[in-house]
Amino acid sequence: ALASLRTDHADMGGTLQRWIDTQRVQDQVTSNHLDQLQQSLDKVNGDLVFVRKNCVQSQKALSTLLEGMNRLLHGYTADMDTMSGAACLQVTRGLLREQRLSSEYGDPYVSERYVPMEALESALSTFTQQCEVGDPAPSPLFVSLADMGLGKTWSVVHYALSLCSREASLHSHTLLPFYIPLRNGLTDGLNTYFAVVEPATTAERCRCLHASGKTPVIILDGLDEIAISSGMRDALRWIEQFLQAASGSALLVLTCRSSVWANSPELGGKQGLRDYLYTPSQERGDEVCSVSLGEFSDSELVAAIQSYGLLSHPFTPLLLRMCRKPFMLRLVAADVVARGQLPDPSDLESFYPLFYSDTDRRDTVLYRMGLSKAVIQHTLGPFLELLGHPCATVTIRQIKEAHIDTKDSSWALVVSSGLLSATHIMRGASFTIATEYLPYVHRLMETEGLLQSAELNLRANFFGVDGAKTLAVALPSLTALTQLDLGWNDLGDDGAKALAVALPSLTTLTHLKLWNNSIGVDGAKALAVALPSLTTLKSLDLGWNDLGDDGAKALAVALPSLTALTQLDLGWNDLGGDGSKALAASLPSLTALTHLDLGSNNIGEEGAKALAVALPSLTALTQLHLGGNNFGDDGAKALAVALPSLTSLTYVRK
C-alpha cells in the first residue's frame, strides 16, 4: 500500500514541500498561490497518515522503512554508517519495489517466470565475490550486452533483488544494490539514491559506505534507452569518472543493446572502460563486454516453458525455435491465457495479429522487438520499401543512398531487434529479413503495397536440415519470389525433402540454386516430384551434390516438364554411365537450353554416346561443360560427330 501511495503522492509531496520552502525565501511568489500549494501538500500528508492508521500490523516495519528511505532520499548517506546491513538492505529493497522493473518495451519482472541463464549467473556470481571480503574490487565494472528481448533487464533485476535477500549468508560485509533504469535518465536515479549527481561526490559516498562494510552495487540498466543520443555519451563519461574516483569501493553493472554498444558513435569512448572491466576468462577480447546474452539453451528453454505451465502444450518445431527468445515465450504464454491454445506460426492468418498491429499494441512481436509504430513509420517502413520483397537483400550503401539515417536511434532499434539478418563483408554490411519472420513481413509489405518481385540469397549460411525445415514453412507465402539461392548450406536429403514440399507454391520462380548441399538419391527423388510444378524455371543448379546414377534417373523424369529451362548445372555429381543415359534421353525436350554443365561426372564411353545422340536437339546451346568424364576414344569420337550441329556454341570444355 505504501509503495503504491508513494508512487502517486509522496514524490509529489516531497517536491512541493522543498519548492515551497525555497521559494518563500528566494522568489516573490504570491501568498495565495503558496497557500494553494500548501493545501495540496497537506492532502498528501493526510493520505500518508491515513495509510499508517490502516496498517496497524505493519506499523513498526513501515516506520523503519520510511525513516530509512527519508534518510537516503535526502542525502544523509553518512547516517547509513550507523545502520546495520539488514536495515540498509531493507531500504534498498523498498526503493527497488517502487521502480518499474522492466525495459522500455518489456513486461515487468516476475520472479516466478525468471529462468537463470547459466553463463550470466556464473559470471555475476564471481564478479560479486570480489567485494564480499571487503577489499577494493580489482575489476569493478560488469557490462552485459544482448539484443532486444533476450532478458538483460530481467537478469539484472533478478541480480539486484537477490542481493537484497542475501544478508543471512554474509558475515561482516553487505552488498547494497541500487537499480537505476536509464530510460528515466541517469541524473534522476542518482538523485533518488544519493541526492548528488557528480561522479566524484557519488564516489565519495560510496567509499564511506564501503569503509563501514557496505559496498554499493550500482546497476545502470538500458544505456541504449536513454532518449537523447548525447545522453549516452554523457553517461559513459560519468561511468569512467566514477570508477576512477571510487577506486574499487563500489561495483557497477551496465546493460546495453549489443548493436548500439558496437555501432553507436556516441559510445566511441567506451575503450576507456577497459581497465575497469571484469571478464570471466583471463583473456580479454576486442569488445568491452563481460557477458553477451544469447537465446535460451535447450535446458533453459524447457525450464522457461515449465515456468509458464506450458509443458503439456504441443509446441511445433518452428514455435520452439521462436520461443528461444524470452520475449517471444512471454507473448506465447499470454496468448495461451487469452485464447486457450498455442499460436501456430505456420497459420499466417491466425499468427499475423500476434506479429503486428497498426494500433501500437504492446503484446505484438514487433513491439516487443522494440519496433513501435513510430519506429515502423520512420525507419522500418522506408527500409521495407527499399527492400521491395522480404527475400531481397540490400547493402548498407543502398540504405544510405535511400536517405535512411543509419546513425539514428530508430535504425539501431531495427538492426538490434532480431527482425533482420546481417551479413558482413569487406565492402560493408548487407541486410535481409530473418528467415522465421519472412511470411509475416511479406504480409506486412503486401498490406502496405511495398511488394516487388525479388530474389532470396541465403547461400553459404550452413543452416543445415533444421534451417531448411524452418525456411520451408516460410516459402509458400513468398508468392512473388523469382530467384532462390540456397547453395552451400549442408541441407542433405532431409533438408531437400523439406524444401521439396514448399517448392510447388513458388509458381513465379525462375532461378533455383541448390549447389553443394550433400543432396543424395532420396533428396533428388523428392525434388523430382516438386520440379514439374515450376513451369517458369529458367535456371537449375544442382552441381556439387551426391546425386549418383539413381538420383540422375529420378531427375530425368522431371526435366521434360521444364521447357523454359535455359541453364542446367549438374556437374560434380558422379552421375555415372546409367544416370547419364537417362538424362540424355530427357535433354531433347529442353530446346531453350543455352548452358549445360555435366562436368566431372564419370559419364564414361556409353554415357558419351548417349549424349552424342541428344545434343543435336539443343540448337540454342552456347556453353557446354563436359570435362573430367573419362569418355575414352570411342566416346570422344561420338561427341565429335554431334558437335558440328550446335552452330550457336561458343564455349566447350572437354
Image (cartoon, rainbow, N blue to C red):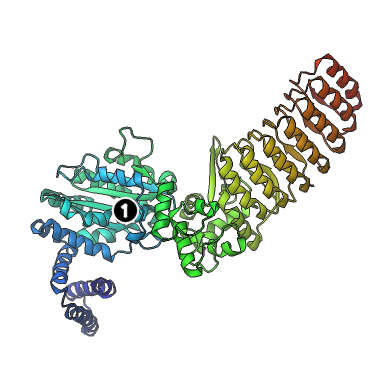
Q: Is residue 406 left or right of 471 when viewed as pictured?
A: left
Residue at 43% from the left image edge and 51% from the top image edge: 301
- Badge 1 amino acid: Val
Could you tell me which quadrant the C terminus lies in? top right
Pinpoint residue 421: horizontal percent, then vertical percent.
Answer: 54, 46
Q: Is residue 106 left or right of 208 when viewed as pictured?
A: right
Q: Residues within 10 Å of mark 1 (few under 14, many from 20)?
A: many
Pinpoint residue 639: horizontal percent, then vertical percent.
Answer: 86, 21
Can you say whether 531 is above or below 339 in the image?
A: above
Q: Is residue 301 left or right of 67 when viewed as pictured?
A: right
Residue 621 appears in the figure: no
In the image, farthest residue toward the front: 312
Residue 592 appears in the figure: yes
Q: Is residue 308 left or right of 423 when viewed as pictured?
A: left
Residue at 38% from the left image edge and 58% from the top image edge: 307
Check disc 1 and report its element: helix, strand or loop: helix
Could you tell me which quadrant the N terminus lies in? bottom left
Query: Pointer 1: what residue?
Result: 156
